[in-house]
Image: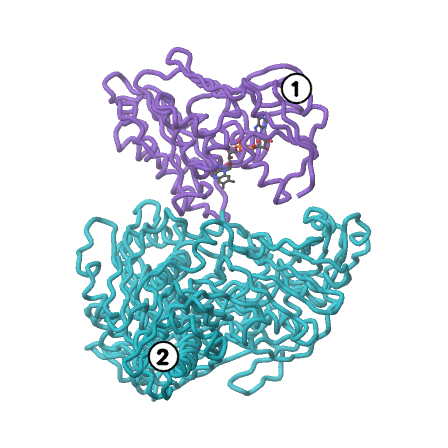
Chain colours: A purple, B cyan
Amino acid sequence: MKDFEYQTATTVDEAVSLLAARGERARVLTGGTDLIVQLREGLREADLVVDIKKIPELMELSYSPRSGLKLGAAVPCYRIYDDPEISRAYAALADSARIIGGWQIQSRASIGGNLCNSSPAADSIPSLIVYDVICHLAGPQGRRTVRVADFCTAPGRNVLGRGEILATLEFPPIKKNSGASYLRFIPRNEMDIAVVGAASWLQLDAAGERIEKARVALAAVAPTPLPLTAVSEWLVGKPATSETFAAAGDMASLAVKPISDKRGTVEYRKHLSGVLTKRTLVIAADRARGASAPAH
Amino acid sequence: MASSTGDNKKYKVIGTRPIRHDGADKVTGRAIYGSDVRLNGAVHGKILRSPHAHAQIKSIDTSAAEKLPGVCAVATGADFPDLKDKIANLGEGAVNLAHLSANVLAHRKVLYKGHAVAAVAATNPHVAEEALKLIKVEYEPLESVTWVLDAMRAGAPLLHDNVVTNSMGKKADKPSNVPTHIHFEMGKVDEAFAKADIVIEREYKTASVHQGYIEPHVATALWNEDGHLTLWTSTQGSFTARQQTAELLQIPISRVTVVPCEIGGGFGGKIAVYLEHVAAMLSRKCGRPVKMTMNRDEVFEGTGPTPGSFVRVKLGATKTGQLVAGEAYLAYDAGAFPGGMIGPGCMCVFSCYEIPNARVDGYDVLANKPKTQAYRAPGATQAAFACESMMDELAEKLGIDPIELRLRNAAKEGTRRVDGPTYPRVGFIETLQAAKASEHWKSPLKGPHRGRGIASGYWFNIGLKSSAAGNVNPDGTVSLIEGSTDIGGTRTSVAMQLAETLGIAAEEVMPRVADTDGVGYTDVTGGSRVTFATGLAAYEVGLDIRRQMTERAALVFKCDPAAVECVDGMYKANGKSLTFRELAGKLGQTGGPVVGRAAVDPEGPSNGFGTHIVDVEVDPETAKVTILRYTVIQDAGRAIHPSYVEGQMQGGAVQGIGWALNEEYVFDDQGRMQNPNYLDYRMPTALDVPMIETIIVEVPNPAHPYGVRGVGETPIVAPPAAIAAAIYKATGVRARELPISPPRLWAAMAAKKP
Ligand SMILES: Cc1cc2nc3c(=O)[nH]c(=O)nc-3n(C[C@H](O)[C@H](O)[C@H](O)COP(=O)(O)OP(=O)(O)OC[C@H]3O[C@@H](n4cnc5c(N)ncnc54)[C@H](O)[C@@H]3O)c2cc1C
């Protein structure tokens, strides 16, 4: 690992100007659980590392049923699942936060970092997609917003421009009779990268029988986290039954175009896409009907 | 959790569970491991490694690296003596020094990705890494081969143009990737197969796996101005490290002192040297101590995994389940240099059973992978996966209970192994009986997608050389000096044998592992030998001390030494008595210090058998295997410290579970490892295994005064076969390739569905 300079910023503007001055050779540090590993292994190089954890706006975590959830980009995972109200309301987000690394990692790692690292296998991005999160960015040209489904552009790449940072993630208020879930498949029980990950979100009718709205997104089956638009649309109006969810799973298997690598084969990933789509839909429907998220 | 079936009444110390002598240091972080060695003025060494799996080195230009500020020394293979094919015995196996030398720094050719090419010492590790990038190596890449059967094929890329096949002493005339062919045969194999009621033949494959010790290789060298070299290192054998280093540098062994540090796991992988003589050469060049520590990827890519293998076994039996004939073909990759684990693989494949007619052919095969090294019962697990899986199939086909089938054929005293030796008293049958009687085996396994499997395993315990000395202190304690680096709690289990012999408490013996100048020659910590052989040395130290203490007692009692009786640490004569401590207090007045010593080289290695029971559940949709319950039953001869015996049984089982389910070297088509890290090289974590239950069986080893058998290695042998048998019960799929990872098992389950 090469020596690098380290600076902490206390305002968004300060961070942006430090970063803009160095361009490609500067990197943002949040929890550092991706960045430090990448620097150590020589996968990335940096002359300057800018720590943004000291910026109050980026450490903000606030929730109200009316306005939804505001998640500062640097908030570590544990603060999400430690908050009973938030983890009940945004159960799929809590599902993701609970499985990113172990508890040591979770006490540092942020959802913002998970998103900005933009790995196709990132465990939080499918959840962010099914909640239809709005990303608030800040850069030398000022502020702008991007829908999370449009944030990642390729493995490790995203829409952030030179000197631009992710400031906050805005989650819309929770809809009535809705529920969501995230599951991933790993061969072991922890410390692994998703072979496939799936998030599902459902809004049911008042009786809890018919699907009014649905969103499904997968991880590790494409160069970027993948919203399954066709499956989501197909689900609308269908009865919220195991037959429907199994059929949605079959559609998901056919919809994805994964690759074979050290973590799994094409066939296996397609198959898992179906299994996990089905399983997350079942849990999302249960949660929509009022079952709360399981504890740890 | 464990139930000991042995009778420990005879003993006061043996069979108890005292707190380990090194416990406080280890739990407080005070124990000195290799990376805790920080010498004044030390600089840091790093190694440049080959990006190619197979290439000719055209040139190496280190001039730019040498000019980088902070760089103290640079070394390449050219700095070391060009060694001829000299064989050095390393205790648990012999090694060709020319190969050892070329393995630790390539000469002319790189033979695997990660093969060391050059080394740099600099004022800090980051500068050293930067300097590596400035070394220009011109390679001419060659075609590579990693799978053992591909490497054996005619026309496969040749690794060495001077290696020919040695087939039971006969040398071929053409170079080949097969350095050795082993053949064992007894009885009338073909006739016996022809007469058998049932014959089955199956093929098995296993991937390369690594020992996965937590502590990476680390060494610090100081080549002093007076020409003396001192090494602080993490090794399984300080004397073998001394010998290898001296040979590789062509200096007398008396010029080298090896100080063994605490060791964070070895499992066979820390016997061969990698860093020691490189650090030494860098130290000689720059006149400062040089410390070298590997990164995890260097450990995976640059040190020895265990062989990937192809094994074909044929078994013939009668209708009633009597084995009548066996045939095995084993091909194990040795990695880049000859001398893999094929020998023990051939000896172990049928070692659990009495098979009157048997034939074994084994092939040591070169491939573009790191040179393989020993890994816990080296070579036995691959062979047992094949043979034990077939015993399970045979039991099913004959409608016989799998324990019953094993009992009918179990090796016992007098059974001849296919490679020649006849067993003395062994405890295999007792492990099977204990398995049958266990609560685990007797309690039914309920629920869908679940299955129970059983398999057995065998490994030798080698004897080899150990030295020890005991100094009697005036307060009645004894300082024990031994040479076996302590990996599994052996300080304590060796000290307990001395305590037992002297009739004092375990805590009254203070064991210390000395450096190579502080104790007599001692072979490696390997081959399940330390509690057996170094324990034997401690016992003899005890006898020596007892003899001298008896003489001192005679002086005090004013009688003939022959009249002094020593019972449970009490020295008695003429109605008078002295405790060991009282007598120790009188040494100053009766002739001075008492030092007991022993050097042993026990003949007749012993044998360890184990039987494992496992319950699994397989997710019918994802094919993920969950280990629900696991029991290890093993003959320990005599469990000196039962907790450490259980620890070995549990640790071996967990490593075997990893080997069975997920661990593997994944290579791309250029022979480059894709997963040299613990993220993607999937060893089990604490969340992946249940508490491993243990049942210690004790059938004392007649060749040891306390009946000790080695226990460290046997427990890794049975798990893959036991788990495969359990998976079969759960899914109907017979897995014949390791690892039985989810994608592979799912594909097999999907193919089976109508
Ligand atoms: C042992 C271990 C286990 C892991 N397990 C998992 C797992 O199970 N699932 C999983 O998905 N990941 C896992 N990870 C990866 C990592 O922990 C997560 O991706 C984590 O969420 C990253 O967050 P961070 O705050 O540490 O990011 P950092 O490492 O600080 O940053 C990640 C990247 O994003 C950039 N960045 C961060 N914040 C911003 C911002 N606000 N604006 C612009 N750019 C930014 C950084 O420059 C860097 O390139 C694991 C990592 C380790 C070391």
Q: Which residue is drawn at the image coordinates 40% and 31% (left, top)?
A: A199
Q: Amino acid at mark 1?
A: Glu
Q: Nearer the viewer, residue B84 or A145?
A: B84
Q: Quadrant of residue B18?
A: bottom left
Q: Chain of mark 1?
A: A
Q: Are marks 1 and 2 on the same chain?
A: no
| Mark 2 residue type | His
Q: Quadrant of the N terminus of chain B?
A: bottom left
- Residue B605 or A88: which is nearer the viewer? B605
Could you tell me which secondary element the residue under label 1 belongs to?
helix
Mark 1: give few (<14), some (14-19) or many (20+) Cα within 10 Å: some
Kindly identify the residue that appears in the image at 64 percent across and 19 percent down. A139
Q: Using the image, determine if residue A210 lies above or below residue B581.
A: above
**Picture coordinates of residue B236 (x, y %)?**
52, 66
Mark 1 beta carbon near ligand 1 (under 8 Å): no
Residue at screen point 38% across, 44% down: A189
The chain identifier of the residue carrying mark 2 reads B
- Please state which of residues B145 and B481 is positioned toward the viewer in this rendering: B481
Q: Is residue A290 above or below residue B114?
A: above
Residue tagged 2: B704
Q: Is mark 2 within 8 Å of ligand 1?
A: no
Query: How far across and down, in percent of the image, does residue B564 sit?
Result: 34, 84
- Depth check, front residue: B40 or B339: B40
Q: Position of residue A293 (x, y in %)?
A: 31, 28
Badge 2 element = loop
Q: CA distance from mark 1 to mark 2?
A: 74 Å
Asked if labels 2 and 1 touch by Cβ distance under 8 angstroms, the answer is no
What residue sits right under mark 1 in the picture? A14
Is B722 placed left or right of B144 in the picture? left
